[in-house]
Image (cartoon, grey):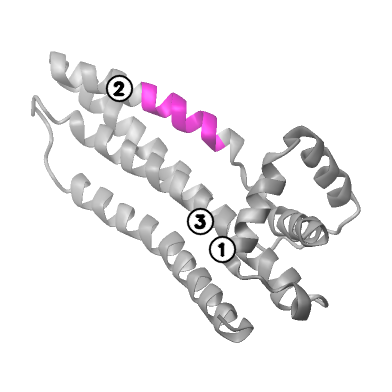
Amino acid sequence: MTPELEYQSLRGELSQSRRYIFERPLVIVGASVALMTIDLKGLDWAGMYPVLVLVLLGFNFWFTVNRLQSSARIIGYIQVVLEGAEKADRLIGWETSLQKYRLWRAVDKAKKQKLLERKLTETPSSDSLRYYSPIYSLHIALICVTAVAAMLIGLRNPVPFNIACLVASLFILVVIGYYCVMWRPFKFQKLIDEEIISWQFVMEKS
């Protein structure tokens, strides 16, 4: 694959990832609004709806973070390898380069992380993933609304099934809450910068 074709392919993957990131939350919002129009009062199985919505939100939250990390990795590769000064003699293809990248990150993880953190302190933040903040806030809002719905359903109709669903909802909330803290927006302010520095080290070792 020529550099031009590889560039177009990776740019296409970036565009697709952004569509997924923006479109999936809208689908979840639509599904949640549709559920709100259903009269769940008195239903002995209504508690399963908040559980399903929370699972869907948790999965999409993980998927969004995964896409952001993948997009940052691709952007770093494009800037360092395809648009960098050494692109002419170091282009070995995305898949081969990605394998080298993963091997570099896998060895001496703690040492590599300290090295990246030191380099990042010397690099001004580009904050190129700022669109993550509103998406993060949207997920938090939907999670809170769903949690309230789970509480109301469980307390208003406390049959065993709804109580079990309420307990399941609370457990899922704890898990999602942990990752919400771990994946706060400020954690991604220098994600692209970190990937650029990582690719620079990888290509130096090639």
**Residue at 32 percent of width and 43 percent of height:** 56
**Residue labelled with disc 1:** 95
**Mark 1 vs 3, N-terminal side:** 3
**Residue labelled with disc 2:** 168
Residue 71 place in picture, x, y as percent: 57, 62
Which quarter of the image is occupied by the C terminus? bottom right
Residues at marks 1 and 3 touching, judged by CB atoms closer than 8 Å: no
Q: Is residue 179 magenta?
A: yes
Q: Is residue 80 magenta?
A: no
Residue 103 place in picture, x, y as percent: 66, 47
- Callout 1: few (<14), some (14-19), or many (20+) C-alpha neighbours within 10 Å? few
**In the depicted view, which residue is nearer to us: 189 or 99?**
99
**In the depicted view, which residue is nearer to us: 200 or 185?**
200
What's the distance in space between the residues labelled 2 and 3, CA to CA?
Answer: 27 Å
| Residue type highlighted by circle 2 | Ala
The answer to whether residue 186 shows anywhere in this view is no
**Residue at 67 percent of width and 66 percent of height:** 77
**Mark 1 vs 2, N-terminal side:** 1
Q: Please give the range of residues in magenta.
A: 171-180
